[in-house]
Amino acid sequence: MEAVLKIQIPNDELHRRLGGGIPTGSIILIEGKKGAGKSILSQRLMYGLLRNGYSATYISSQMSTIEFINQMKSLGYDIIRDLVKRQLIFISLYPLFVNVTSRDKILPRLISEPRLWKTTVVIIDSLSSMLPDEVDEDVLRSFIVHLKRFGALDKVTIITVDPDDMDEHLLRILEEISTILIRLSVKVFGGDLKNSATIVKYNNAPGNFQKIIPFRVEPNVGLIVEIASVV
Ligand SMILES: Nc1ncnc2c1ncn2[C@@H]1O[C@H](COP(=O)(O)OP(=O)(O)O)[C@@H](O)[C@H]1O
Ligand SMILES: [Mg+2]
């Protein structure tokens, strides 16, 4: 297997700004508040990976399958064929949240379900909204061991979290075990809101990467990296 998974799509800057792809074995933690761009960035990474031939599983706490298909379509990311070919597996955990006590069972279930971990890439968006208020230490340890094993198989996990919605101790542990840490924020620039991704940590970066990547989201086009001078 190659050392770097490509994420390039036509007319794209993100691939280059991220140093030319994602190293195999990466555990990518994407942090951001509501609307900061956690879902959009994970959807863009997923789409890029699919277009370069890799398989992916997207586990969503937010969307039903129909909503996911519509969301991807509205971004200009056509994934219907990938779903049909099972190159892309979409899992909606949304109905589980009707019952808050069922959150206790989500991490153990994620770990113990081999079907979820067959693809090259697994995306969990967002982990913070799947977790109970208090995560059992043993469960957390098993989850981390599981992520590391998955990485050792040269696979990639992308996890999104909202720091406001998560135990601080747990967040620090996830930050420590992640090999790539991206913090998303929204800032006001000239009366406009701008999304921005800060690469806090990037282990085994394949090339030079940009530490702060401003971006916007456009209908039918998806995530667009802003030229640096704009922000
Ligand atoms: N399909 C879309 N078309 C246009 N803008 C979108 C679309 N999806 C998301 N956005 C915008 O992208 C930004 C980030 O959204 P999102 O990734 O859903 O945030 P988060 O997952 O961090 O809560 C928001 O400003 C949102 O309005
Ligand atoms: Mg989201």
Image (cartoon, rainbow, N blue to C red):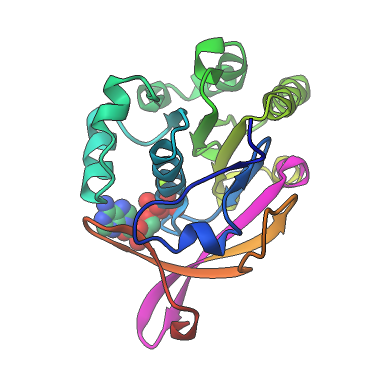
Left or right, 145 with respect to 111, comes to right
Quadrant housing residue 199: bottom right
Q: Please state the horizontal and vertical placement of residue 160, each as a whole percent of the image.
A: 54, 44
Q: Residue at x 64, y 30 (%)?
A: 1
Number of numbered discs on residues: 0
The magenta stretch spans residue 142? no
Viewer-nearest residue: 127 or 86: 86
Q: Residue at x 35, y 23 (%)?
A: 95
Look at the picture and state if 23 lies above or below 61: below
Viewer-nearest residue: 151 or 170: 151
Q: Please state the horizontal and vertical placement of residue 11, each as a whole percent of the image.
A: 34, 61
Left or right, 225 with respect to 137, comes to left
Look at the picture and state if 12 lies above or below 193: above
The magenta stretch spans residue 191? yes
Quadrant housing residue 90: top left
Q: Residue at x 69, y 24 (%)?
A: 153
Q: Please state the horizontal and vertical placement of residue 99, each as a whole percent of the image.
A: 43, 21
Part of the protein shown in magenta: 173-196
> Magenta part mainly helix, strand or loop?
strand
Q: Residue furthest bottom?
A: 190
Look at the picture and state if 55 lies above or below 213: above
Left or right, 61 with respect to 222, comes to right
Q: Residue at x 67, y 59 (%)?
A: 207
Viewer-nearest residue: 77 or 61: 77
Viewer-nearest residue: 57 or 101: 57
Q: Please state the horizontal and vertical placement of residue 229, each as a whole percent of the image.
A: 48, 85
